[in-house]
Amino acid sequence: MPVDCHSSLGLKGVPPPRSKGLQMRRLALKLVFSASIGGLLQPNLAALQTKPYAAKEILPPAKRAARVQITEGPNLELSNGNSAIIRWTSNNPGGTDEHFGVVSYGTDPNNLRQMAKGHIRLNQNHSYTVFRVRLDGLRPGTTYYYAVDSMEADGTRDGVKSPVSRFTTPEPSKP
C-alpha cells in the first residue's frame, strides 16, 4: 500500500504536490530539517570531514610504442582565410603523457620552415591518439604544404613523419 508522504510531513490542508519527485524532495527536506534540529546531522558531517583526502594514483609514463604509425590522415579539418586546423590519428605513441602534435608547413613543398604545435595529454587507456593542430597567420588564397609529426614535452620526437600534403586557404569573400 502506498505511503502518503504529504500527510506524514504534517502538511494537512496543503494540496499534495503534482509529482512524486516533489513529494520526495519535501520528505528529504523534512528529514534534513528534523535531523539538524535534533543534532543528528552534526556527527555525520564530522565523520565525513575527518576522513583524509587521498589523491588519485598518478601513473608512470606509458611504455613507448615500438613503432608509431599514422592510421588516419593527416587531413585539413577546417580552413578560413587566416587559419587552418590539421588533424590526424596515430597509434598511441606512449612515453610521457604530455605530448604535442607538430605541423611543419610553408608555401614551398621542399622548404617547410614554419612550425605549429598543438598540446595534447595522452590517455594511456586508449590504443590511438587524435592530434589537432591550428595554423595561424595564414594568407588567404595561398597554397600551403605541410607534414605532421608528434613529440613528447621534452622535444623527443615520436618518429612518425607524414608525407607532404597541401591545402589552399579560401579567398576572402567579396561583398
Image (cartoon, rainbow, N blue to C red):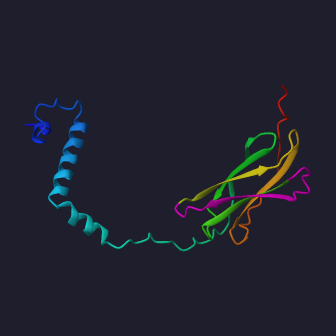
Task: Spot the residue most to the top.
Answer: 175
Residue 73 at least partly seen: no
Along the viewing direction, whichever of 63 and 121 lies nearer the viewer? 121
In this image, 128 relative to 5: left or right?
right
Residue 138 position, x and y percent, is 84, 47
In the image, is 2 to the left or to the right of 161?
left
Residue 14 lies in the magenta stretch? no
Tell me if 2 is positioned left or right of 116 in this view. left
Front-most of residues 16 and 14: 14
Q: Quadrant of the C terminus?
A: top right
Residue 22 point in image, percent of width and height: 24, 37
Picture quadrant where residue 67 is located:
bottom right
Which corner quadrant holds the N terminus?
Answer: top left
Q: With 29 as the anchor, is 68 left or right in this view? A: right
115 in the magenta segment = yes
Quarter of the view holding residue 129? bottom right
User: Residue drawn at (60%, 67%), measured in percent from left and top?
Assistant: 97
Name the residue furthest front. Answer: 37
Question: Can the viewer see residue 11 in this picture?
Answer: yes
- What residue sits 31% from the left and 72% below the top? 51
In the rendered image, residue 157, in percent from the top left (x then y), is placed at 73, 68
Residue shown at 67% from the left, 60% from the top: 119
Q: Residue at x 78, y 39 (%)?
A: 80
Q: Which residues are magenta?
A: 106-125
Q: Nearer the viewer, residue 20 or 63?
A: 20
**Residue 37 drawn at (x, y percent):** 17, 56
